[in-house]
Each structure stands twice: as C-alpha cells, then as structure tokens.
Image: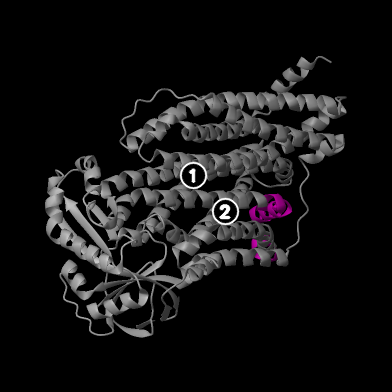
Amino acid sequence: MNKLFYAKLAAQNLKKNSRSFLPYLLSCVITITMYYVFVSLTFNPAIKTMRGGYVLQEIFNFGSIVIGLFSCIFLFYTNTFLIKNRKREFGLFNLLGMEKKHLAFLIFWETLYTIAISLCIGLGFGIILDKLLFLGINRIFADSLSFGFFISPTVILNVVELFAIIFALIFIRALFHVQFSSPLELLKASQTGERAPKANWLVALIGASCLGTGYFMSLTIKSPFTALTNFFTAVLLVIIGTYLLFHAGSITFLKLLQKNKNFYYQPRHFISISSMLYRMKQNAVGLANICILSTMVLVTVSTTCSLALGIEDSLSFRNPFDVVGTSFPSLELSEQEKKQAIEQTKDFLSHDLEQSITDTGLSPKEIAWYEYLVVPALQSNDTFKGNLTAMDMNALINMNTLDDRYVQFVFISKDEYNRITGNSLDPKGNEVYFYSFNGVYPYNTITLFDSTFQIQSHIDGFLIPADIATDLSTSYFLIADSATIAQIQQQSAKTPTLFYGFDLDNSSEQILAHSDKIDSLFIDLPMQVTTHIKADERNDQIAINGGLFFIGILLGLLFTMAAVLIIYYKQISEGMADKARFEILQKVGMSQTEVRKTIHSQVLTVFFLPLLTAGIHTGFAFPLLDKIIQTLGFFKSNLFALAALVIFLIFAAIYAIVYWFTSKAYYRIVKR
C-alpha cells in the first residue's frame, strides 16, 4: 500500500476530528510559544547590558525550566483525552482490515503533522512575542538600548529538541495503546466508564493529614528563614493532600448526597451525581489538576504583583536616606586602635561629612548617624546565651534551627537614641526600652550574660541599619544607658558599628553619576565601610521585582490556559460519553429544560469546587508566603493581602466566563 495514503488519511482524520484536535493543537502552540519566549530572553545578549540583566536572565532561565517540565506533563495529560476519543476510530480501521503496523503509520503521520504545525506556528508567535516583550521590559526599566531582531539558532534548536522528545514519547504511548488492545477493546474504549468507587476512609484520612500538616506549617512558622527552607515541603504536602482528598473525599461527599433521598431523587441531581460518581476516579484527577493550577495562578501572580507594587516601600525601609551605610574598624587593628578609629569616624560624621559631600559636587540636605553594638545570642524563652562559638553556629545551621534559637541584640545608648530621634528616654541601671524586628517577644525581662534587664516599654520603630534590615534572623533593639552597654561590650568582646545616612538635594541621575565619589568619602579612615545608594538599589530592585512580576504574569497566563483547556477537554470528553445516556433519558420523558438544568448542576459542581479549594489553599498559604517575601525586603502584609484578594476576584471572573462557554459547549454536544 502506498505510504502516502497514510499521510492523506492522517490529514483527513485530523480535519474530521477538529473538535478534539484543535484544542490540543492550541495547547501545543501556546506551550511552545511560552517556552521559546523564556529561552530566548535567557540568551538575549541585549538583556545582559541592562541594569540587573544578570538577575533577569537567571529568572528567565528558571522560568524556562518550569515551563519545560510543565509542557511535558500538560501535553501528556491533554493527549490522553484525544487518544480516548480516537480509540473507537482506530478499532474500526482495525476491523476493516488495517493492521496494527498500518495504524502505526497513521499515528506517525498524525504526530508528524501535529509537531510540524505546532512548531511552525508556536515559533512564529514566539519570535513576535519575544520582540514585543523585550521592548516592554526595556520600557519598564527605562533603558534605551539599540536592539536588533534577535533570532538565535541555538534557541530554536533547544525548543525543537525538547518538543521533539515530548512528541516522540506521546507517539510511543499511543502505539502502546493500539498495539496491546484488541479491535473490540478499541471500539468500546471511548464508551467505557469506571465502576462507581467505594469510599476509602484511609485514603481520605491520609489526604486530610497531609493537607492539615501543610496548613499547620504555614500558620505556625514564624521566621522568614524557616519559611524559606520549608516552603517546598509544605507545598508538596498540600499537593498530595489535594489529590487524595479530591479522590477519596469527593467520593465520600457524593455517597452522602446519594443517601439524602430528598436531594438525590430529583432528575437533575440524580443524573449529575450518578454520572460524576461512576467516573469519579478520572474526575478526581482532573479536578485536582485544575485546583493545583488555579492555586499556582493565584499564588504566583499575587506574590509577584505585591513585590512590584511594593518596591518603593521596601526600598525606603532598607534605605531611609538617599545614602546609607555602616562602618567598623579593620579587624587587624588593636583594641586601642579600634577605639581611636571609631572616635575619629564619629568626629568625621559630626563635623566633616557635610563639607566632604559638598566637595563631591552634591548638596547634603540631612545627615544622621549613631553607634550600635551587635551581640548574637541563643534564645531559650527569656534567657539568652551570648559569646557564641563557631561550633555553636555550625550546630545551629546543621540542625536547621537557626530561626528558632538565633537572635541578634542591637544595643544603642540612650544618648545616641535621644540625639537621633529627639526623644528623652532615660533608662537607668538594668532598665531598657525594647523594639523587636522580625519577631515577637512576649516577655518582660531579658537575661543575658547573667544580667537581667527589665523592659520599661516597647518603642514603635527605629532607623534600621541595612545589614540588619536584610537579615533573616530576629533582631532585638535595646535602648540602655552607656554603662550597661560598656559592660555588655566587655562581656561579649564585640566592637561597635557606626550607622550613617544622609539625604541629598539632587536628582537620582546626579547621585548615580557621583556614586564613585560617595564611596570614597571614608577612604582616608581606618574603617571597613559598606555604602548603599538608594537610587542604585532602586534600579536593582526594579530589575529583580520587575523580572519576577514579568515571569509571574506569564506563568499565570500559562497556568490559566492549562486549567481552561483541562476543563474544556473534561467537558467535551464527558459530553460525548453522556450524549447516548441523555438521548435515552429524553426518550423516556426528560425535557430539554430538565436536561439543561442537569448539565448546569453537573458542570457547576465540576467547575467551582476547584476554584473554592484553590481560594482556601491560597488563604492558608498567605502567612508562609508573607514570611518568604520578607526575605526580598517586602514588609507590607496589608498590600499583599489586598493584591491576593483582587487577583482571586479577577481569576474567579475569568473562571465564570469559561464556565459559561463550557456549559454551552457541553449542552450542544449532548442535545444533538
């Protein structure tokens, strides 16, 4: 037989099965487009020249890995629906005399057409979208770059290789289904449902335990460090719990509805519940997939939106002045030389810094500085162990308990505090005023180095040095008298640090142009200096958070598309399976109105259960996510909560629109 016959037959088959094939082709095109965009932006040489370009390329590289893994799983899942609907056709060909090897030729050509069409269209859209997105990034970051039309053979080859492997695996799986099934099995495959499963309380209990543990971790973890290290464990537990509960829990729920005779024995409820129950195993997997994808959309987009909107707030928190910095004596100096270096620097900050800034060509507007002493310690309730050794620190890190036990005390003399704030606090002896950063302290006393300090009052806030503001550990600020601090310094053998900051009456561009001169202000002092320029950090922060926002929106669109297509395939596949059953029901007296109500009841349940569960997942994930984004300098929990709520409402509106279209498509199939 002429092998071109199979090529023509494959083309005709795909055309005839356009209802099932076109959504699958759309899935392939979108995943290829998205993957190409991320890989292309990763390798785009122009992005390297942008401020923060290295960070952006790392973000895009991570996004391309996520999309590559997702594409493989998603295309396998959507192809399952296509194969199920095509098995009857393959069985008919087999009965008419076409051998299994001939069917293999037919499937080969269909796969070849699919990969050729999807790669051509996907790469075409990818190249256009890549150009538009890069111009968007360039505009967001206010960089004027000469940018040509970047098309890399390496990127195209990367895309072709990945999707060639995915389609080859899909082809092998299709051959497996055909080769190991008899013609009769193929004919009945699309009509074969599943037996109504029994409620499995053990599986439901395991699922509830996994979900409850994940929720408990999110609600009880207090430290950003622990949140960061335990995030993926909590996510994995929630995913496992979701799949198990959708399988066992949904069956149990439907069984309970069956026992409610007043509810169950109504035409629309009877048909929808019976239909869902007897196909529940497949339904459960699909519903869980939709729920997980919806949760990923909500979490990804709300988190990245919050970071993008909160750039200025987080920047101002870490940089309360246009220029901030810390300085401490060089380690090789003797104790006496360290004291002299500190005094020399304090004199410079008090009398010479303003003139030195003016000499650089900038105009100082406000200058502030103070001395503080940092003492690390291990906490046990209200008692702390100071003088930590290297062995203590290694044990903490190895035990992964740094967040629970490790804290930093930041001692500031009352004279320094009153000078910088204009207050008149007057702690005496072992009295202290207290401020907690990144933690909650419920006690009224503090025992450190065998001395017990009495907390007189909690202060609302303070100028936080940049090195402490970006630290993941808990910091306790104590305002005490000078004699107490001198005693703590002697016991801890720590050297004080100087924090300084100043505002400038200049534009950001002028400040950045003089950044080298700003860095050299302290060059003649025997101090190790770390300087942060707010304008410079703003650009870096825009690059990081803007890149995260960009990848969050694209991933959100991808996951939304995936959820919509899974729902569409579910409803189309089940509509084809339910068509014969609804025809029988209409012949025995069920009206078109009752059919529509039954469909509405079934589709409504299938649609909004995953959305409701995704909202619950996101709500419980909020405390954990809030801790994690604190590591990126974001401390506006209210803004994050508002962003999450708005994103959920927008996603729910999109979800409702998809529900409306899907129910109409399902009804059109059934009523034919």
| Residue 498 locus on image (x, y percent) | 26, 63
Report the number of numbered marks. 2
The quadrant in which the N terminus is found is top right
Residue 250: mark? none
Badge 1 is on which residue? 556
- The residue carrying pointer 2 sits among few (fewer than 14), some (14 to 19) or many (20 or more) residues within 10 Å by Cα, namely many
* Residue shown at 31% from the left, 48% from the top: 537
> At label 1, which amino acid type do we have?
Gly
| Residue 572 visible in the picture | no
As for residue 272 lying within the magenta part, the answer is: yes
Residue 610: mark? 2
Which is in the foreground here, disc 2 or disc 1? Answer: 1
* Residue shown at 58% from the left, 67% from the top: 212
As for residue 580 lying within the magenta part, the answer is: no
- Compared to residue 7, the image places residue 463 above or below, namely below
Q: Which secondary structure, mark 2?
A: helix
* Residue shown at 32% from the left, 43% from the top: 539
Q: Give the magenta-colored segment's residue range.
A: 258-284
| Residue 18 visible in the picture | yes
Tell me: 407 left or right of 37.
Answer: left
